[in-house]
Image (spheres, rainbow, N blue to C red):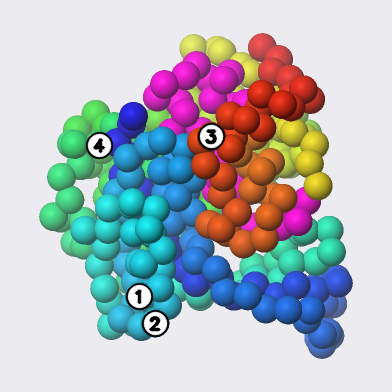
Amino acid sequence: MPNILVVGSMNMDIVTRVNRHPLPGETIHGLNTSFFSGGKGANQAVAAVRSGATVTMVGALGEDFFGNEISRLLLNDHINLSHVKRKSSMTGVAIITIDDSGENNIVLNKGANGIFIPKDLLDVELIQYDAILMQNEIPWETNAFILEKASELNIKTVFNPAPALTIKDRYFPMIDLLILNEIEASEMTNIPVKDQESAYQSALRLIEKGVSEVIVTLGKQGAIYMNQNGTVFRSSAFDVPTVDTTAAGDTFIGAFVSAYFNNDVADSLKYAAAAAALAVTKEGSQKSIPFLKQVNAFIKEAQDFLINV
């Protein structure tokens, strides 16, 4: 059972269902609105703990109702929140619209996430963790601080650059596992990623920059894995009805990191793809993330999945 530290964002997601997304300047009627605990950091923490990992969450919440509610829900999942800071700011909020096909548009207000700074991590003993998982919904200076400290301590780092940004070349060798989607891969490598072949070229460029392992996810087209030893896996995706894709990527990442410590790469990719597939069949972020037994049962019943070496 891996012991994972997640350093990242926690948001309240305000989700409105629509028949279609509005055009610029257009007003349309929403079908219904719901509130869900979210944020990439919290979502990935929930996915990891529900897949069997021990998880500590580090980040910032506001001193408001949303902060209290998010804390309550994460504690229900047995996530350690002892290092979560409370800020005199509103809790992060994501405004999400989801259309009939399940695709989403998201507007993010960072709130407390945006003022989570390196000094907020000084009381965290990093050495006790098997891996540190990060995303880009907190200030880059905080992620850079973690990458540098983890490199000094030889702790495995997993980085999900979402939203994507340009980082200095010296940080790439500090990233042990980089997991990103086609949009983020395109932005970080200047290679338009549309299919597995272009994902391969993008992953190769990231490996050449010094990243130890790379996974580029492609939604319904599956994913590609590459490492510095030249190992490559191309995986498919499970075909399921899509209700809400909001937390699919976060579910894949948290599930993969949890599975990775007890399984080989191919099995971990399959497990993560199954977890993500189950997540898109339900509405909400953390509410949609499946548990270990559910994922294993789904894999046992499913037939339509392929790993190519």
Give whichever of discs 3 and 1 has the lower sequence position.
Answer: 1
Which quadrant would the N terminus be assigned to in this image?
top left
Q: Label 4: how many residues lie within 10 Å, few (<14), some (14-19) or many (20+)? A: some
Q: Secondary structure at mark 1?
A: helix
Q: Residue at x 41, y 68 (%)?
A: 70
Query: Disc 3 marks which amino acid?
Result: Lys
| Residue 270 part of the magenta-drawn span | yes
Task: Specify the segment rendered in magenta.
Answer: 242-271
Q: Residue at x 43, y 56 (%)?
A: 42
Circle 3 is placed at which residue position? 293
Give whichever of discs 1 and 4 has the lower sequence position.
Answer: 1
Does the residue at mark 2 contact the one at mark 1 (Cβ under 8 Å)?
yes
Q: Label 3: how many residues lie within 10 Å, few (<14), some (14-19) or many (20+)? A: few
Query: In 3D space, how far apart are the residues under numbered discs 3 and 2 (Cα atoms)?
Result: 33 Å
Give whichever of discs 4 and 2 has the lower sequence position.
Answer: 2
Secondary structure predominantly adopted by residues drawn in magenta = helix
Mark 3 or mark 2, which is nearer to you? 3
Q: Residue 242's x, y, as percent? A: 78, 51
Q: Secondary structure at mark 2?
A: helix
Which quadrant would the C terminus be assigned to in this image?
top right
Mark 3 or mark 1, which is nearer to you? 3
Query: In 3D space, how far apart are the residues under numbered discs 3 and 1 (Cα atoms)?
Result: 29 Å
Give whichever of discs 4 and 3 has the lower sequence position.
Answer: 4
Circle 2 is placed at which residue position? 65
Circle 4 is placed at which residue position? 129
Circle 1 is placed at which residue position? 68
Q: Give 60 or 186, whichever is nearer the viewer.
A: 60
